[in-house]
Image (tube, rainbow, N blue to C red):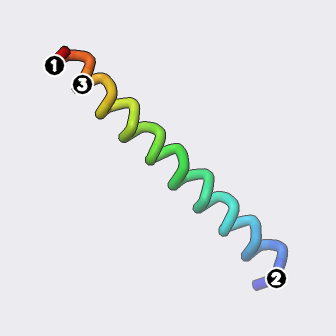
Amino acid sequence: MSQGAEERITVHTRVFQFLRKLFLTSQVVQQLYLIL
């Protein structure tokens, strides 16, 4: 496995984790919005 491929996977993982965090945050915000 080349160095470039490993870095690319790391970037993809970071982006995926960021999107998942963003998705979870938006869900929490929607829940709070419904409560309020």
19 and 30: which one is in front? 30
Badge 2: residue crowd in 10 Å (few <14, some 14–19, many ≥20): few
The quarter of the picture where the N terminus appears is bottom right
Please give the name of the residue rendered at 39% of the width and 37% of the height, measured from the top-left corner: 25
Mark 1 or mark 2, which has the lower sequence index?
2
Secondary structure found at label 2: loop
Mark 2 or mark 3, which has the lower sequence index?
2
Quadrant position of residue 5: bottom right
Q: Residues under labels 1 and 2: Cα distance?
A: 50 Å
Residue on which disc 1 sits? 35
17 and 28: which one is in front? 28
Residue on which disc 2 sits? 2
Which circle marks residue 32 in the picture?
Answer: 3
Please give the name of the residue rendered at 61% of the width and 52% of the height, measured from the top-left corner: 15
Please state the horizontal and vertical placement of residue 31, each as a whole percent of the image.
Answer: 23, 26
Please give the name of the residue rendered at 83% of the width and 74% of the height, measured from the top-left corner: 4
The quarter of the picture where the C terminus appears is top left
Of badges 1 and 2, nearer the viewer stands 1
Amino acid marked by disc 1: Ile
